[in-house]
Amino acid sequence: MTTNFKKRTVLLSLFIAVFVLMSSIPLSFAASDPSVNKKVYLTKASYVQLTDANLIPSTKGATASFTFTIYNGDSSSINLVDYWARLKSKGGTSYSLTLLDKDNKKSISPKSSVSLTYYSEVNASVTLDQLVLSFIKFDFSVPGYERTVGQFTFPAGYSNQVKAGGYKGVKVNNSNVNVRIDQVNVTKSGDDYSINMSYVARNTNKIGVALPEYSYYMQTSKGLFQLKVKNTADQNLTLEPTVLNSIRLYGTIPATVPTTGWKLIITQKAGSSETVQVELPVVIFEVPVKISNTTSSRKTFTDENGTYEVNLQSVQRFPWNNDDNIVAKLLVTNKESVYLPLPELSGTMIVDGNINLTSQTIKNNGDIGLAPGGSTTITFVGKLPYEYQWNKFELELNETVGEDKVQVAEVTKSDVTAIYSVSFNNVYTQKSNGSQMSVTVTDVRTYSGDTNEIYAVFMDVTNNQTRSNMLPLFAGYFKTEDGNYYEATVVKSAEAISPTNKDQIIAYTELPPNVSNEGLQLILGEAFDDTGLVKESTAKPTGYIRAVQFGLPVENQDTLRYDQIKVGPYQVSLNHFNVFAYEDSLEIDLGGVVNRDYGYDGFSQSKLLFELEYEPSNEVIWSQVVDMEGKSEGSIQWQTGENYNSISKPMEQNKYWSSYTLNVYETFNGNKKKLFSKDIKFSSTINWLDGNH
């Protein structure tokens, strides 16, 4: 895995010793030994007890540290100036102990206790069971002026670290706080292990206390590696009484480091000045590491907000320009019992183990959070040359923390999921947030021009949301029977669509003259650009997601019916056409009934072109646009209900033939689709559309 956050082995440059501010006796889940933690009585009522001992690596070898708790059960104060600690090896080597500055107290009041922490540098090869620790009292009546009050030795293999699954009580500003590891997630990607883990802290006192500014390290057989706090707000967290607080950590460790014997060391700086400060361990936890050698399509991860499950549902390839868009759909589920925000995930696509593809993250419109147990999808889109065929596909998921990218999961699904197909006369339904809709193909039409033909597909898109909304912009391709692709251009309304109402969209392309539309399929998906999913009709898409392959009907070539001519949301039934020549003018009577489907809020087509043509010579002697919306210059507007117009057109030259053809077209981008055609003759009395001629 390649990440932005730094990885470094941190050998503590300052002395590291056992933290003094722990509870006087280790809790049942922390390591303890009766022979080590024995009480040594100073008087009948007062005693000293070794409550913590540790040995960890340092820049000078190793640092041994020891904490004594002294209880004064007498009625007068104990003078601490009279007491000290000595350390030597069983071989006789003496080590000088230093008392932590903050513990440099003068006396202990009756019926109270204090803790004293001493530390010393020792050889790197030394272990605790090779050391002898003595607690002494200065006594000028004995030789050497020191009298040993108690001596402490350690059994072989002794350690005071918290076992896996255990907890420990520590002192935080005189408050008792129980701490334990909660979750550990270690994943391997590339040359690194990515660590995501958390520990929890519960304040058992009745007053809140601020979490100290701790530092965090992972101890391995190869050294110490620093971890970072994922949520910077946790660095100033207040531990309220009884509340279980979770603090999340992250970092990386080279994959060459063995994963056995890892320990989490939590430290706190202590000392009277910046120059003499030491970094002391608060607690050391055993960290069990389990790394799966296999990557699955489903993983669970935890961040500062909670626990999520991610499932790579599909990986698809959609044509786009000279590449394929690789579209990975990820299902994200809230595994908590409370609402969670949608995680801010980025993705790196890894093809065949070592080809990394950057990807764009696309969320559903309106997705901001997840109910307990709730799910939604996040889509990741990358690009790959369309000729490349992979054997293995992985998606590495990351969250950004500050300037660092933190891997939270890696999922895989190498098989390419086929594009979902909807046959003609069936309805495609989309239920994703912000895109609840139904889509169905209603018609196909070929519009002829002087130099080209436009093949267009009409589709109804129904708003299944409970509020008016602009419906998605679509983008995609037409696919021929032999597997060639031709880009589709989509026309949609710029208006919001009311609930349950429709937008009539048109997807079209210019097919080369040698390409048949027989068996043509339309692949359409929701368009996106660099900002995410788009709805504006003027947007410039850079791809599409959630693509569907729509089956298309055979084009209707019937031009005989004049009673159910469809254009946009209108159905026009022609019922009158009469034409004759009078002197030097052409007299025309034109009539029809218009019905509108008010279920359409969005549409672009609304006009018909009438032409009177002498087809043997392709001469048009009269043309007229009838626009139901009245938006075309020079047009006649027909409204819903009965319409009738008398038209007089000057005849500039003599064009009298025995018969003519009345053609009715729908126009699109300057091209025409013939919807109705009828041969007629000039007559002042005949209505050619009365059903009798």
Image (cartoon, rainbow, N blue to C red):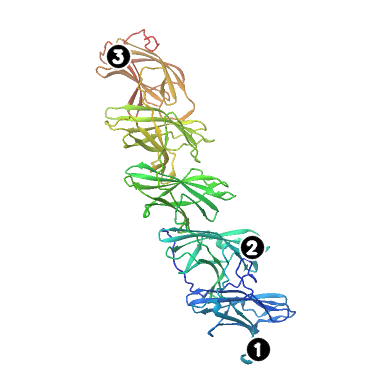
Kindly identify the amino acid type of the residue bearing the numbered disc 2: Asn
Graded by Cα atoms within 10 Å as few (under 14), some (14 to 19) or many (20 or more), the crowding at tag 3 reads many
Q: Quadrant of the N terminus?
A: bottom left
Question: Is residue 10 among what the camera can see?
Answer: yes
Graded by Cα atoms within 10 Å as few (under 14), some (14 to 19) or many (20 or more), the crowding at tag 2 reads many
Percent x, y for residue 619? 26, 18
Residue projecting furthest to the left: 617
Question: Is residue 95 among what the camera can see?
Answer: no
Judging depth in this view, the residue of 155 and 623 nearest the camera is 155
Numbered tag placed on residue 154 in the rendering: none
Q: Which residue is mark 3?
A: 660
Percent x, y for residue 527? 41, 40
Are the residues at dot 1 and dot 2 in contact (C-beta closer than 8 Å)?
A: no
Kindly identify the amino acid type of the residue bearing the numbered disc 3: Tyr
Kindly identify the amino acid type of the residue bearing the numbered disc 1: Asp
Are the residues at dot 3 and dot 1 in contact (C-beta closer than 8 Å)?
A: no
Residue beneath the point at 47% across and 75% down: 59
Residue projecting furthest to the right: 75
Ranked by sequence position, the earlier of labels 3 and 1 is: 1
Ranked by sequence position, the earlier of labels 1 and 2 is: 1
Numbered tag placed on residue 203 in the rendering: 2
Judging depth in this view, the residue of 446 and 641 nearest the camera is 446
Q: Which residue is mark 1?
A: 139
Percent x, y for residue 457? 38, 30
Residue projecting furthest to the front: 156
